[in-house]
Structures are given as structure tokens and as C-alpha cells.
Image (tube, rainbow, N blue to C red):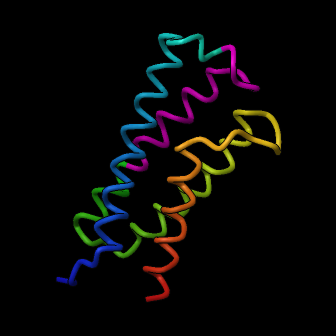
Amino acid sequence: MREWTRTYYLIVLLTLEKIVQHVVVTLCFLFDFGGIRTIVAVDYRYLMVAGGIVAILFFIALWGLLTEKTWSISLVAGLAVFDIVGEFIAQGTIFITLMVSFVVAIVLLVLCYRTRKG
């Protein structure tokens, strides 16, 4: 069993945040809370399906992290990249509004890189 570092704990915590975030946003699209469907650049149904799938994949990554699977850091990093690209697609412009989701994905990507290098 490996020794968990602060970085590893932070990756676990932020992965949990990403699960909650994707579930909440998917539900917001489903029930059109706050008129969210009208503020995205692409059909909300694509974003809703993608968000649900990504939430499940983040959950799998969390399970992998907690059970110390070697592939889990790579999965988290890949999902973080997907999240970053997805923000540009959802907003439909290169000049996006920086959302908490985007910042968390960047932090996750950096932490995963540090963990892989370390």
C-alpha cells in the first residue's frame, strides 16, 4: 500500500467535486433549471448525455483512486482534459467565461501531472 500524499488527497477531493458537479449540471439540463438550456452553444441533450457519462467515468476514476489502481490518475487527467475542451464547446467560443469547473479541471490536470512525475 502506497503512502498517500496531500496531492493525492486533493486529487481524490477534486474528483469527488467533479462527480457532484457533473450530476448537478446534468440534472439542471434535464429540468432546465435557470433556463440553462438556452445559454449553451450546442444542443443541451448532447451536453446532458456527455455530462452523465463523464460523471460515471469520474466515479470509476474515484473508485480507482481509492483502491490505488495505477490507471486512475491517467483517467482523471483524461477526464480533466475532456472537461476543459467541453467548456469551450459548451460556450461556443475561444474567449470563454472562466467557470469553477474549468479551474478545477486545470488544477486536477496539474496535480495529476505532478503525481505522475513524482
Query: Where in the figure is residue 92, as x and y percent of width and height?
Result: 79, 34
- Relative side of 4 to 88, left or right: left
In the rendered view, would you say 54 is above or below 3?
above
Q: Residue at x 28, y 78 (%)?
A: 5
Kindly give the residue lying farthest to the bottom in the view shown: 118
- Relative side of 30 to 35, left or right: left
Q: Residue at x 43, y 37 (%)?
A: 21
Is 55 one of the magenta-colored residues? yes
In the picture, the quarter occupied by the C terminus is bottom left
Q: Residue at x 59, y 10 (%)?
A: 35
Q: Nearer the viewer, residue 79 or 111?
A: 111
Q: Main secondary structure of the magenta part?
A: helix
Q: Nearer the viewer, residue 70 or 5?
A: 5
The magenta region covers 38-58
Query: Where in the figure is residue 111, as x and y percent of width and height?
Result: 47, 71
In the rendered view, would you say 28 is above or below 71?
above
